[in-house]
Amino acid sequence: MTNQEVGDRIRHFRKAKGLNQDELAELALLNRVTIAKYESGKVEPGARALSRIADALDVTVDALLCRDDDQTPTDEDDVWALREQLRRDPNMRILFSTATRATPEHIRAAAAMLKALEPNTFPEDEPQEFSE
């Protein structure tokens, strides 16, 4: 197993849990830069760090090391993470109640539309044309 594969697993489980790097670092008693280095594959986490990260993410160390097929990330984990982000954000809570009844495909489509509407999506110096 490569550092990058472990980093990818950490990132996936972190996102499935609805955490950002700062939040995971706080829960695992590490710092954000360390988490970023693990996720990028630049640094291999030691046994103690893996144990702390696994505890913070409610998974096993084996799951982080791809030795536990029962905890393999799925598309459903990604959908759950999106729903959790909607639930936690007070500005998006109204969407959460709708998302609980939506299919995974609808949730992904809605997330893509919301992302496209984020501030700074359109260059401010270029006028935008909208047709009715």
Image: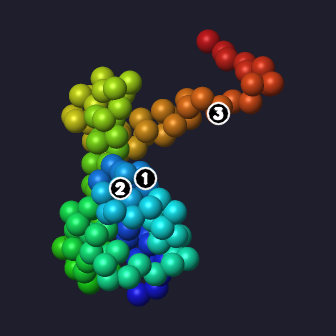
Q: Residue 46: which quarter of the image?
A: bottom left
Seen at 43% across and 53% down, the residue is 22
Could you say which is closer to the camera, residue 99 or residue 90?
A: 90
Question: How far is mark 2 from mark 1, CA to CA?
Answer: 6 Å
Image location of residue 87, percent across then percent down? 28, 34
Residue 31 horizontal side relative to residue 103, left or right: right
First reached walking from the N terminus: tag 1 or tag 3 = 1
Residue 121 marker = 3
Looking at the rendered image, the quarter that the N terminus falls into is bottom left
State if disc 1 and disc 2 touch (CB < 8 Å): yes
Asked if residue 63 can be seen in this view, the reply is no
Q: Which residue is mark 2?
A: 26
Seen at 41% across and 78% down, the residue is 45
Q: Residue 96: which quarter of the image?
A: top left
Secondary structure beneath disc 3?
loop
Secondary structure beneath disc 2?
helix
